[in-house]
Amino acid sequence: DADVTQTPRNRITKTGKRIMLECSQTKGHDRMYWYRQDPGLGLQLIYYSFDVKDINKGEISDGYSVSRQAQAKFSLSLESAIPNQTALYFCATSARGPSYGYTFGSGTRLTVV
Amino acid sequence: AQSVTQPDIHITVSEGASLELRCNYSYGATPYLFWYVQSPGQGLQLLLKYFSGDTLVQGIKGFEAEFKRSQSSFNLRKPSVHWSDAAEYFCAVAPSGANNLFFGTGTRLTVIP
């Protein structure tokens, strides 16, 4: 099994729908992150969490929310999806901070029509 | 403004040729520096990282990178490219005291026979 698992791998949804992307990890890492990848823009940070009670906004949090259900689970929600949220979404974990590097999931490709 | 710049959007090299991918950063103090690779349909995998010390660092898959403080650069190199190296490559930095990584926009590598 992968260290960081994202579900679903692909999703097509309609404008205005609520959708949740899930991430689970077996690394035992405290820190978890959600990034969005758009062609030509690299990865942009949406939210990050240092533990279950510590949630922080990233560069582009508007339109998104997160839930850290347990140390191993970190979900990203789009309350009312819009077409410009069509992107590739990555979950990542790290042991104690970015200087230790990240472990990435395989990504969720989301299309909002 | 603080940034990570990868000036080459797309590079094409012949199999067996040498490769250099450029990365420049603009942060006050020397940050932690990373190179990640993303194969099609996959998450990002850490190739190598620089914290301090020897400015030439070795990574996985035969890659190396050289940190040059005077140029604020951290270029990735490989002496002989293999077809399996075709992927997208991301430079990332963790500024001193930062809680997350900042990524460049990526360089897509195509390898021709």
Image (cartoon, rainbow, N blue to C red):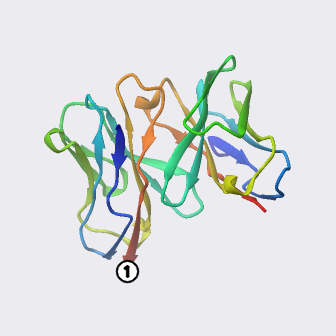
Residue at (68, 52) in percent of width and height = A85
Q: In which quarter of the image is residue A80?
A: top right
As displayed, is residue A1 above or below residue A84? above
Label 1: which residue?
B112
Q: Name which residue type carries label 1.
A: Ile
- On the image, the x and y values in percent for residue B61 come to 36, 56
Tag 1's secondary structure? strand
- On the image, the x and y values in percent for residue B38 come to 49, 57
Q: Quadrant of residue B86?
A: bottom left
Taking the image as shown, residue A79 lies to the left or right of residue A102, namely: right
Taking the image as shown, residue A65 lies to the left or right of residue B95, namely: right
Residue at (62, 51) in percent of width and height = A106
Chain containing the residue with disc 1: B
Instruction: Residue at the far top: name it.
Output: A53
Q: How many marks?
A: 1
Instruction: Residue at the far left: name it.
Output: B70
Taking the image as shown, residue B70 lies to the left or right of residue B36, namely: left
Q: Quadrant of residue A57?
A: top right
Residue at (63, 36) in percent of width and height = A61
